[in-house]
Image (cartoon, rainbow, N blue to C red):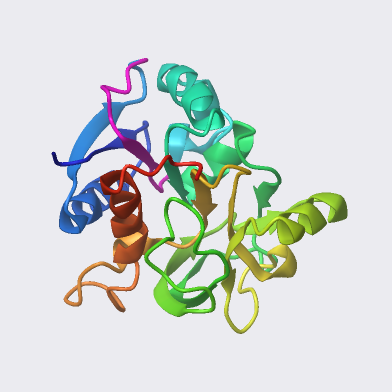
Amino acid sequence: MTARVGVVTFPGSLDDKDAARAVGLAGAEPVPLWHADADLKGVDAVVLPGGFSYGDYLRCGAIARFAPLMSELVPAARSGALPVLGICNGFQILCESHLLPGALTRNSSLRFVNRDQALRVESADTAWTGDYAEGQEILVVLKSGEGSYVADEETLDELEATGRVVVRYAGGSPNGSRRDIAGIANEHGNVVGLMPHPEHAVEALTGPSTDGLGFFTSVLSRLTAGTPAHA
């Protein structure tokens, strides 16, 4: 049976179609999910895409965390049962929803960064990175103005000690992220947030590589194997 992966659209989402295409290329059925519907439609996993949810008013992701759909998503994700991937604005939403620790702030340059970005995979133990090897370098796209990951030292130390730093910027952070962190996971490994865009690196014709596809095939491998998302 084909896995069904939901892709959420908020007002201001702009990478939802790209995320849905990546899901389809990976071999799953993309299922559109609307922010105002408190219904996950029985999907097996969820992607929170990039963009500017609710126009980034107040703070990036601050309003999206209160969307009706999130009332269903948050408890399912927190339990470890539902794999959730947050990309760029989706990462910000996961932090605002307290599914992931820390926050995303203005780039240290105070400028929007748009570039092809090398990442180093630090953990292949999550639901979204199992098809990579630890230490593997991949090339995806980074495009954000508020992409600097920050957290207090205690939180950063805990993320490091528990293997929850998922990807780092190779060659140094382009946006001031603490410890060059580009993406992190929750304690179960089913929720992953990252600032760069793997969905823009899934086809050789349009991306800098096809390295990003592994995020989407990884969750399908986990689901197909029948392995719990938090295993």
The kind of secondary structure the magenta stretch mainly shows is loop
Q: Nearer the viewer, residue 195 or 60?
A: 195
Q: Nearer the viewer, residue 164 or 33?
A: 164
Quadrant where the N terminus is found in the figure: top left
Expressed as whole percent of the image width and height from the top left, the position of residue 34 reads 30, 25
Figure label count: 0
Residue drawn where x is 64% and y is 62% of the image: 107
* Residue 118 position (above or below residue 51): below
Q: Is residue 35 left or right of residue 105?
A: left
Find the residue positioned furthest to the left: 1
Can I make out residue 212 in this image?
A: yes
Q: Quadrant of residue 167?
A: bottom right
Residue drawn where x is 40% and y is 61% of the image: 197
Residue drawn where x is 36% and y is 18% of the image: 36
* Residue 59 position (above or below residue 51): above
Residue drawn where x is 64% and y is 74% of the image: 173
Instruction: Give, as a single range, the part of the protein colored magenta.
Output: 38-51
Can I make out residue 60 in this image?
A: no
Q: Nearer the viewer, residue 87 or 125?
A: 125
Q: Nearer the viewer, residue 123 or 201?
A: 123
Expressed as whole percent of the image width and height from the top left, the position of residue 196 reads 47, 62
Expressed as whole percent of the image width and height from the top left, the position of residue 83 reads 42, 40
Find the residue positioned furthest to the bottom: 171
Q: Per the image, is 45 magenta?
A: yes
Q: Per the image, is 21 magenta?
A: no
Q: Is residue 28 left or right of residue 168?
A: left
Q: Is residue 186 left or right of residue 77?
A: right
* Residue 157 position (above or below residue 81): below
Q: Quadrant of residue 62?
A: top right
Expressed as whole percent of the image width and height from the top left, the position of residue 206 reads 21, 72
